[in-house]
Image (cartoon, rainbow, N blue to C red):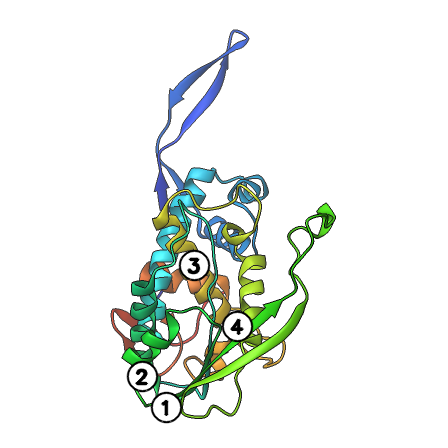
């Protein structure tokens, strides 16, 4: 049996008194599961925190707190379930965002590839762009147990008088260079991951360019990314696959609802049959809308 998880928050209410207002301490408010699901659903669809506050009536501080808790739970959930994966092709690309500053950090790249190697079986074919940290990171993680190539796109130089409407549009691609780094990959391309980066920017408000929606704290940013990834893999049906990515990989057997994702993240209960265990997660039959 799944027990509803409640988020307890302190609140202050305003009561009218002689034409003015006085502040009065109130008992703890309990955020219902329906409100939790509504708030998380909005965040997963790229709605900003303040807009989510207006849509749901939930205080933005509570939304941030809930988002971090669910996001942190999603990180643990995803880490436990995404293992032993049979993947034939891997595409690598960076997704830049702003928290405090941009860092071109090779150590992060090596840690990411090492984590990826621990989850993927066999010798996949890997493609990346020309980011200089990739060749060393791939060699350290995969060695010769892969084929690996890079692709670099060369863009036309824009003139200084380009109109403002196109200032942030990508320049025209004038040539493409592919390089075999390990073995002889049959296909070197980053088209899928570039499209995935577009989906990320559309579905995660914190990645939207040229706005003030960027993360103010790194912990919030990490939780938001974990929420996006878990929602994309378990809840969102891929248009080409007609199933979720997790179903395609055989990790789960059905499309998760937002409620099921929230339950798994906050309670550690997976809505899937089989009696298997993933770390601290217990698998149960069925699930709730």
Kindly indicate whether the residue at mark 2 contacts the one at mark 1 (C-beta within 8 angstroms). Answer: yes
Quadrant in the picture for the N terminus: bottom left
Front-most of residues 263 and 101: 101
Ranked by sequence position, the earlier of labels 3 and 2 is 2
For the residues labelled 1 and 4, the Cα–Cα distance comes to: 19 Å
Q: Are marks 3 and 4 in contact (CB under 8 Å)?
A: no
Q: x and y percent of residue 250 in the render?
A: 43, 84
Q: Work out how far the residue at label 1 is from the one at label 3, CA to CA, in angstroms.
A: 27 Å
Instruction: Provide the secondary structure element on which disc 2 rests.
Output: helix
Q: Mark 1 sits on what residue?
A: 123
- For the point 29% across and 72% down, the residue is 282
Q: Residue at x 31, y 81 (%)?
A: 139
Question: Residue 204: horizontal and vertical position, in percent?
Answer: 52, 56
Instruction: Report how far apart the C-alphas of labels 1 and 2 lie in the structure.
Output: 8 Å
Instruction: State the separation of the CA atoms marked 3 and 4.
Output: 16 Å
20 relative to 55, above or below:
above
User: On the image, numbered disc 4 is attached to which residue?
Assistant: 193
| Mark 1 crowdedness (10 Å alpha carbons): few <14, some 14-19, many ≥20 | some
Q: Are marks 2 and 4 in contact (CB under 8 Å)?
A: no
Q: Nearer the viewer, mark 3 or mark 2?
A: 2
Could you tell me residue 2's position as x and y percent? 36, 63
Name which of mark 1 and mark 4 comes first in the sequence.
1
Q: Note whether residue 186 is visible.
A: yes
Q: Which residue is mark 3?
A: 225
Q: Are marks 3 and 2 in contact (CB under 8 Å)?
A: no
């Amino acid at each position: 049996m799944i027990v509803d998880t409640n988020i307890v928050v302190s609140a202050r209410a305003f009561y009218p008194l002689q034409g003015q207002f006085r502040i009065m301490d109130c008992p703890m408010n309990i955020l219902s599961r329906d409100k939790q699901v509504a708030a998380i659903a909005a965040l997963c669809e790229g709605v900003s925190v303040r807009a989510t506050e207006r849509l749901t009536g939930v205080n933005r501080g509570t939304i941030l707190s809930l988002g971090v808790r669910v996001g942190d739970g999603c990180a643990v959930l995803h880490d436990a379930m995404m293992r032993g994966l049979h993947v034939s092709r891997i595409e690598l690309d960076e997704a830049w965002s702003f928290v405090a500053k941009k860092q071109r950090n090779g150590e992060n790249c090596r840690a990411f590839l090492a984590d990826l190697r621990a989850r993927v079986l066999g010798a996949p074919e890997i493609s990346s762009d020309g980011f200089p940290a990739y060749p060393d990171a791939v060699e350290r993680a995969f060695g010769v147990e892969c084929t690996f190539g890079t692709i670099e796109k060369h863009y036309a130089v824009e003139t200084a008088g380009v109109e403002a409407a196109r200032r942030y549009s990508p320049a025209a691609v004038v040539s493409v260079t592919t390089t075999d780094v390990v073995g002889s990959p049959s296909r070197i391309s980053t088209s899928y991951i570039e499209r995935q980066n577009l989906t990320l920017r559309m579905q995660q408000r914190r990645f939207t360019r040229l706005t003030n929606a960027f993360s103010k704290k790194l912990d919030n940013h990490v939780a938001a990314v974990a929420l996006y990834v878990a929602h994309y893999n378990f809840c969102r049906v891929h248009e080409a696959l007609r199933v979720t990515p997790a179903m395609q990989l055989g990790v789960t057997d059905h499309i998760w609802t937002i409620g099921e994702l929230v339950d798994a993240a906050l309670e550690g209960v997976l809505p899937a049959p089989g009696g298997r265990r993933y770390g601290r997660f217990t698998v149960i039959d069925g699930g709730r809308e």
